[in-house]
Image (spheres, grey):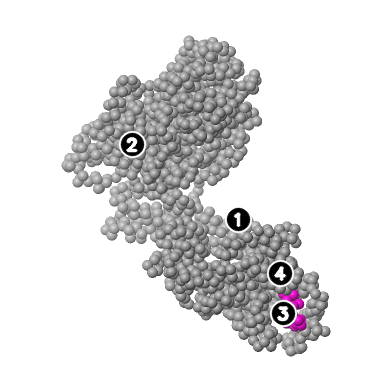
């Protein structure tokens, strides 16, 4: 193994080749010959590479992660050979492992520790303790405990190292480092005896955050005792002693251990120093060693190992993805190297490139390595919950080592909507009487019926008592309730009574435990009455607060054993106490049936390419439905597994040898309680693994040791392993499983593989003919697997241990806050004042309870009706407010904006500023929304309830239902309104502002007052498109080229202009662009008229337009421009060089029409004199033929010479005067 | 009045390599006196656009542009008043407006330091008076007014037709008392791509349920021709996702009678499935 890693480090083989080598049994054709040769010689070791790598990393990191032993473990002989080294009395993997699974192992681990630390290869006695010690069989191979690799985190590897008798160079070279280790301790140990406690908290889950609290000051050292509830949730209900006590016990054990070491260790002389050695990291933890990218040693080597490691993770070659991530996070947040790197100067650079030197020589190396690995797994990280992302993005080490990754994480954080909340309001409500199954007709006799009635009462009595007392210290389920439960069971004589009771039991189970809150226990159990008085709003806030307060509480490390948290504990204890064979059998039957029913439920499926935002709402609903089904299935399967394997489980270690064979022979005869193999196969075929596998995992997690050896279950594990391997996260493509679905499956499978009863050779040694997981070809195109049914909330609900990542990061932040300023936010108590006055809180709570009680006694349809009405009316209310109040405000905003624009002129100032002003004026009006909303709900709800309920509903019931509906609708609407009304007004006003400003901006025509067509208009005017087309034809005729027989008649022109007038007057079909083009075309037409360029049809002699006709047409145009065009007409084009240039082509040139036109323009006020003068002036600049320029000059002089305000008479006679322009031209 | 596929094909047949000029349109009108000018122009435009799409690239090689520009320069040196550019476009079988744009771009490249922006070119094409060279301005203007398939004027006509028919359609709906949401209302509701009208209450037309109506001012393109091989006027794709057209709306040739607009229907592809089947209304003339 080491050889492989070494050849990798020496760059003899590429990372890709190694990963291919591990992942496949056969050599890939891609590998080059050299690599193939190098690797094929090591073929036999292939399976052991991954465990070796994992162990190697754990060992290497042991100096950094404070709980590990101070140095990499040595074989006794090796350490003996080096007296200078403060002995590696391997405080080994037991301690390190136990840290992963603290609550359950706190006791046992400690108890076993002395043994474990010696040899490290013994099996734990209890099931929960097993995990640490498993995989020992592999260890026999002489390698380093391959199986244990996945399970050990801080594992020093000391238990495995002893067996590493192979010539393993690292050991020897490591020795060079030891002196410094020894050099540190003497000082601190002398001065701070308290450090001796150091190893104890190792077994606590919050090892990282603890040091700073536990050992700095005595009072805080009792802090762990604040976590009894976490400890209490140990899988088998063994209440563990409070933290302080366990600490003491551990101390005791340490003492024992030390004494053993004194006897056995080859270096017994200096036990204290090596014990003390990790302590500097502890006590110094307030001044964590800063990590500096510049001080990373042997980057290349770290990069290579990180790459191999990442590739193994990416290929799912490691058993548990999140465990590895946890490890990497630990490296990232490592506080202090046990040995200061600087004090290790003699380390020669020559050994830096092989395994001989430690991989992590400093904190810098650890962080560098961690960041390298994290970079490869950004996709997974980006799918974690928002809180984790935030902590990651704010991690200053990440920022300093990889700003790019930090940037991506920050972006992911900002884009993330995955807020996960695991604390939900608990619901403890009795299952109501179900008429269809609970009535007399379903019972064989009156007696059975009445017995069941009584049992129901007893059951709820027991339940209530449990609720009241189970958190009291010293209260014992069996003692308190056991006899009553058994007495009740005894009364269930008839078989059918059992089935009735089981149905009740199961329904109650689902009702109480289905929500995450149920799993979390009655979080506020101490004073439910007081809290319920708070009202829903306040209660929600309280829960959020409580969640934050409880956040550090661990669920038991990244790989907790199966547990029955919260209410589930009641049902487990009930089953145990009842110890009724009939009950168990009926329960199994019922659970199996329900599981099959739910598993086969046709959940809505989606087309995977549906990305429309609008279906988001539906998605939410369907996702929710999936979550409910999945969580129910998991709960049922967990209990089925618990009951089914109950007879076979015991605290004693699994049998071996012949005994095992005979048990196997026996057990293989027993048919499975539920044919899970078939269900799994079907689920995989139907691409519903995302539904089937999570509950199957729950079921299997309760299996006993023999189960995985049975052929039936072995098949299942093989299938699951193949599935696990096939879920490569980076492979995303059409028709593949959704990312989060994969992540969920990887998380639950990874968890399953860490369950003590699952032998680990299953993971590392199991090798099917092909690891490629083939889905049946007849599988449906789109199964549940392809639908994004899993979100972060569901992922974290199913796998709360993923939250450990967040806790790790959070503990780092809180630990380093002193230095960096910290990101921890203080919870500032604020009293919130809602927008509207609220009824007194107590009465609100009481009302809610009354409503619940009311519904409980009424048919379910009544409740559904009331809730439906409330839901709809509430929603309608919001819509109504939007359409009335908000719309009014928007109109106000528009008029205010107009005023602003008028007062401030064209520009009107910065739009953002305008918006602010408007919003500050209008948003206060939003407060009216609540009153209006309340009024709306009050008005609308009763009628709807009345219409939907049966006519015969009693008046009192009806009025209660109406009132509740009003209340619920009001609550719903007001909650939404008070939260969103300001934002809504803002958004709408913003849209209105931008609309108004846009209308202002580029389209000046839109600003002016637009006249519509007159009321009498029948909209029979020619269509604008037709007119543009017609005018275009005339223009093209005039511009040519044209055939000799082409032309237009004067009448046609006149008709055209008439039609243009009609169209402009009927604005029905006119759009602004069309009007613009019409205006431009009309100007062009005028220019052609002036230049006499329009070919006229008619007698050959009269080829030109008669002067009078031309003037008449120009008059028509002038009047159109003046009267009918509402947009601007580009009249200056009349004097553009191109249009004036048209005159140059006519011979003889005639200027009188142009002069006429200019005068008319001025007179009609269409163009100003100055404007025309300017145009004429600029005409001079163009290049003209000599004579034309001259005539032009004359024209402008003539025009300028006109009196500024010519009298009408004068102008009239001018019309009849001989054409002055012509005269001019001819002269 | 309904235009059949066969009639459409016959008209299209006559339009193979015909320059998009007034004269061509006049000849077409003489050939098919029963069809209105607007219908013929619409088909002409459609067919010509297809032709240009096919041949567009070859006119845009730098060699081609250079040779056109040289020919233009030589032409105007000989006679600036002659329709040099228009003749050139017709000769090389390219749309006059597009040829004008090509030469204008080339001209500006030569005379300006920075390459001309698209908006400047467009603005000059809309108003050739802005073109610094008088001769070129005249040439460009001549191309634009003589082109009946491309150019700013034609674009405006098309736009106007679209607008007019939307108004007509709205009037018809109001007249029939059908409640609908128009495009603006739909956009305000957050729809990105919308048909012209969504009926708030679906209607049945000849046994088919219509949810939306889209009016188009031009004929459907080729994909619709492939999808639609019947001689019939109406066609429906009521089943989502069956349509062979991948890009969205489809239409088939249609022509109206004098009272109502020509209508066509089309399904809508799966890509926008928030609209149920609707009707794709084709208004060619009035």
A452 relative position to A541: left or right:
left
Q: What element carries label 1?
A: helix
Q: Does residue A525 show up?
A: no
Mark earlier in primary sequence (3, 2): 2
Residue A1156: say if magenta. Answer: yes
Looking at the rendered image, the disc whose residue lies closer to the viewer, 3 or 1, is 3
Q: Mark 4 points at which residue?
A: B137
Corner quadrant of residue A1091: bottom right
> Residue B78 or A493: which is nearer the viewer?
B78
A614 relative to A1010, above or below: above
The answer for which chain carries disc 3 is A
Mark earlier in primary sequence (3, 1): 1
Identity of the residue drawn at 53% across and 68% down: B218
Mark 3 crowdedness (10 Å alpha carbons): few <14, some 14-19, many ≥20: many
C-alpha distance separating marks 4 and 1: 49 Å
Q: Are marks 2 and 1 on the same chain?
A: yes
Mark 2 crowdedness (10 Å alpha carbons): few <14, some 14-19, many ≥20: some
C-alpha distance separating marks 2 and 4: 83 Å
Q: Name the residue under label 3.
A: A1091
Q: Does residue A586 show up?
A: yes
Q: Which mark is residue A916?
A: 1
CB contact under 8 Å: marks 4 and 3: no
CB contact under 8 Å: marks 3 and 2: no
Q: Is mark 2 on a helix, strand or loop?
A: helix
> Residue A491 or A715: which is nearer the viewer?
A715
Q: In terms of secondary structure, what is the magenta stretch mainly?
A: helix
C-alpha distance separating marks 3 and 2: 95 Å
CB contact under 8 Å: marks 2 and 1: no
The answer for which chain carries disc 2 is A
């Amino acid at each position: 193994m080491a050889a492989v890693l070494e050849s990798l480090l020496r760059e003899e083989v590429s990372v890709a080749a190694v990963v291919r080598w591990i992942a496949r049994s056969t050599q890939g054709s891609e590998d080059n010959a050299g690599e193939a040769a190098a690797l094929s010689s090591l073929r036999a070791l292939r399976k052991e590479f991954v465990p070796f790598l994992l162990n190697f990393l754990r060992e290497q990191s042991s100096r950094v992660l404070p709980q590990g032993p101070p140095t990499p473990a040595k074989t006794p002989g090796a350490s003996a050979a080096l007296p200078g080294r403060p002995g590696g009395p391997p405080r080994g993997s037991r301690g390190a492992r136990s840290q992963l699974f603290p609550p359950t192992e706190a006791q046992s681990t400690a108890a076993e520790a002395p043994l474990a630390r010696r040899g490290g290869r013994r099996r734990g006695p209890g099931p929960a303790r097993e995990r640490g010690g498993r995989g020992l069989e592999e260890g026999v191979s002489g390698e380093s405990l391959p199986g244990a690799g996945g399970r050990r985190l801080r594992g020093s590897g000391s238990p495995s190292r002893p067996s590493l008798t192979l010539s393993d160079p690292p050991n020897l070279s490591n020795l060079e480092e030891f002196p410094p280790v020894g050099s540190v301790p003497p000082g601190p140990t002398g001065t701070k005896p308290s450090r001796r406690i150091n190893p104890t908290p190792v077994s606590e889950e919050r090892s990282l955050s603890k040091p700073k609290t536990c050992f700095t000051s005595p009072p805080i050292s009792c802090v762990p005792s604040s976590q009894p509830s976490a400890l209490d949730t140990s899988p088998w209900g063994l209440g563990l002693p409070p933290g302080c006590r366990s600490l003491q016990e551990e101390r005791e054990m340490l003492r024992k251990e030390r004494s053993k070491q004194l006897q056995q260790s080859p270096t017994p002389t200096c036990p204290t120093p090596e014990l003390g050695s990790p302590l500097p990291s502890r006590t110094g933890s307030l001044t964590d060693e800063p990590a500096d990218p510049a001080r990373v040693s042997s980057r290349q080597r770290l990069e290579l190992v990180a790459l191999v490691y990442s590739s193994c993770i990416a290929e799912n070659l490691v058993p548990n993805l999140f465990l590895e991530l946890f490890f990497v996070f630990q490296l990232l947040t490592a506080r202090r190297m046990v040995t200061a790197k600087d004090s290790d100067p003699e380390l020669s650079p020559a050994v830096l490139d092989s395994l001989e030197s430690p991989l992590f020589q400093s904190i810098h190396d650890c962080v560098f390595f961690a960041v390298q690995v994290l970079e490869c797994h950004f996709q997974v990280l980006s799918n974690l919950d928002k809180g984790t992302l935030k902590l990651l993005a704010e991690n200053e080490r990440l920022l300093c080592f990889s700003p790019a990754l930090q940037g991506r994480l920050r972006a992911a954080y900002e884009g993330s909507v995955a807020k996960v909340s695991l604390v939900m309001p608990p619901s403890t409500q009795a299952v109501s009487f179900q008429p269809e199954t609970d009535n007399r007709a379903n019972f064989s006799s009156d007696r059975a019926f009445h017995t069941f009635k009584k049992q129901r009462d007893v059951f709820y009595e027991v339940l209530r008592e449990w609720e009241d007392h189970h958190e009291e210290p010293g209260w014992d389920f069996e003692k308190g309730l056991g006899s009553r439960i058994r007495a009740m069971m005894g009364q269930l004589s008839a078989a059918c009574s059992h089935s009735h009771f089981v149905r009740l039991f199961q329904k109650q189970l689902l009702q109480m435990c289905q929500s995450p809150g149920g799993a979390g226990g009655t979080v506020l159990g101490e004073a439910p009455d007081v809290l319920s008085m708070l009202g829903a709003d306040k209660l929600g806030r309280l829960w959020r607060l409580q969640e934050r307060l409880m956040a550090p509480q661990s669920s038991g490390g990244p790989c907790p054993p199966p547990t029955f948290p919260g209410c589930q504990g009641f049902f487990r204890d009930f089953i145990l106490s009842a110890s009724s064979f009939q009950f168990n059998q009926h329960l199994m039957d019922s659970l199996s049936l329900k599981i099959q029913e739910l598993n086969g439920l046709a959940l809505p499926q989606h087309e995977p390419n549906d990305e429309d935002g609008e279906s988001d709402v539906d998605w939410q609903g369907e996702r929710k439905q999936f979550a409910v089904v999945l969580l129910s299935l998991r709960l049922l399967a967990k209990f089925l597994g618990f009951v089914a394997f109950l007879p076979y489980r015991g605290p004693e270690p699994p049998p071996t040898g012949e005994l095992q064979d005979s048990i196997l022979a026996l057990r293989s005869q027993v048919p499975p309680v539920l044919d899970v193999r078939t269900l799994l196969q079907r689920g995989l075929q139907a691409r519903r693994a995302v539904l089937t596998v999570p509950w199957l995992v729950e079921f299997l997690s309760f299996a006993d040791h023999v189960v995985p050896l049975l052929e039936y279950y072995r098949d299942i594990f093989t299938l699951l392993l193949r599935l696990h391997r096939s879920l490569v996260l980076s492979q995303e493509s059409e028709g593949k499983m959704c990312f989060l679905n994969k992540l969920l499956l990887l998380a639950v499978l990874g968890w399953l593989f860490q369950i003590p009863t699952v032998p680990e050779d299953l993971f590392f040694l199991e090798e099917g003919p092909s690891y490629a997981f083939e889905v049946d070809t007849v599988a449906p195109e789109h199964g549940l697997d392809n639908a994004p049914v899993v979100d972060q909330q569901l992922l974290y609900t199913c796998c709360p241990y993923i939250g450990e990542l967040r806790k790790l990061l959070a503990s780092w932040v809180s630990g380093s806050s002193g230095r960096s300023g910290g990101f921890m936010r203080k919870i500032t108590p604020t009293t919130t004042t809602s927008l509207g006055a609220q009824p007194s809180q107590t009465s609100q709570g009481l009302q809610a309870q009354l409503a619940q009680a009311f519904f409980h006694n009424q048919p379910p349809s009544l409740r559904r009706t009331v809730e439906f009405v409330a839901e709809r009316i509430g929603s309608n209310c919001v819509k109504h407010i939007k359409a009335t109040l908000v719309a009014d405000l928007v109109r106000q905003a528009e008029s205010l904006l107009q005023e602003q624009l008028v007062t401030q002129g064209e520009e009107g100032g910065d739009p953002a500023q305008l918006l602010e002003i408007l919003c500050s004026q209008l948003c206060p009006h939003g407060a009216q929304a609540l009153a209006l909303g309340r009024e709306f709900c009050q008005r609308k709800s009763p009628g709807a309830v009345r219409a939907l309920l049966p006519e015969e509903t009693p008046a009192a019931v009806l009025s209660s239902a109406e009132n509740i509906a009003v209340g619920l609708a009001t609550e719903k609407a007001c909650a939404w309104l008070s939260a969103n009304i300001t934002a809504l007004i803002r958004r709408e006003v913003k849209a209105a502002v931008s609309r108004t400003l846009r209308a202002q901006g580029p389209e000046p025509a839109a600003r002016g007052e637009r006249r519509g067509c007159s009321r009498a208009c029948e909209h029979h005017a020619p269509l604008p498109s037709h007119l543009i087309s017609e005018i275009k034809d005339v223009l093209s005729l005039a511009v040519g080229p044209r055939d000799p027989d082409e032309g237009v008649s004067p009448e046609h022109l006149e008709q055209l202009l008439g039609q243009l007038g009609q169209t402009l007057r009927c604005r029905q079909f006119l759009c602004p662009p069309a009007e613009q083009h019409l205006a431009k075309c009309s100007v062009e037409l005028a220019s052609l008229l002036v230049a006499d360029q329009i070919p006229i049809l008619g007698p050959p002699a009269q080829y030109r337009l008669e002067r009078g006709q031309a003037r008449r047409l120009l008059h028509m145009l002038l009047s159109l421009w003046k009267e009918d065009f509402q947009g601007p007409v580009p009249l200056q084009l009349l004097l553009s060089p191109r249009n004036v240039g048209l005159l140059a082509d006519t011979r003889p040139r005639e200027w009188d029409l142009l002069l006429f036109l200019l005068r008319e323009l001025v007179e009609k006020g269409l163009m100003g004199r100055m404007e025309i003068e300017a145009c004429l002036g600029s005409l001079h600049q163009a290049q003209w033929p000599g004579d034309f320029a001259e005539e032009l000059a004359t024209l402008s002089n003539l025009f300028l010479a006109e009196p500024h305000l010519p009298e009408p008479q004068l102008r009239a006679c001018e019309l009849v005067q001989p054409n002055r322009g012509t005269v001019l031209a001819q002269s | 009045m309904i235009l059949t596929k066969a009639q459409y094909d016959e008209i299209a047949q006559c339009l193979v390599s015909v320059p998009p000029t007034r004269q061509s349109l006049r000849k077409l009108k003489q050939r098919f006196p029963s069809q209105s000018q607007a219908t013929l122009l619409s088909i002409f435009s459609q067919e010509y656009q297809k032709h240009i799409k096919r041949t567009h690239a070859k006119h845009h090689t730098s060699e081609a542009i250079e040779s056109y520009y040289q020919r233009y320069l030589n032409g105007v040196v000989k006679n600036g008043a002659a329709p040099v550019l228009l003749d050139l476009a017709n000769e090389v079988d390219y749309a006059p407006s597009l040829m004008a744009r090509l030469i204008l771009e080339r001209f500006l490249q030569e005379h300006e330091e920075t390459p001309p922006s698209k908006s400047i070119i467009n603005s000059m094409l809309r108003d050739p008076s802005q073109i610094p060279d008088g001769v070129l301005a005249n040439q460009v203007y001549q191309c634009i007014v003589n082109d009946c398939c491309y150019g700013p004027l034609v674009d405006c006509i098309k736009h106007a037709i679209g607008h007019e028919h939307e108004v007509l359609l709205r009037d018809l709906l109001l007249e029939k008392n059908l409640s609908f949401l128009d495009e603006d209302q739909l956009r305000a509701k957050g729809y990105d791509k919308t048909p012209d009208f969504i009926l708030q209450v679906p209607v049945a037309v000849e046994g088919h349920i219509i949810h939306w109506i889209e009016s188009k001012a031009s004929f459907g393109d080729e994909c619709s021709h492939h999808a639609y091989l019947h001689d019939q006027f109406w066609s429906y794709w009521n089943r989502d996702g069956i349509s062979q057209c991948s890009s969205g709306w489809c239409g088939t040739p249609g022509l109206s009678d004098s009272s109502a607009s020509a209508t066509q229907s089309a399904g809508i592809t799966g890509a926008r499935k928030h609209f149920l089947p609707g009707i794709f209304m084709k208004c060619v003339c009035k």
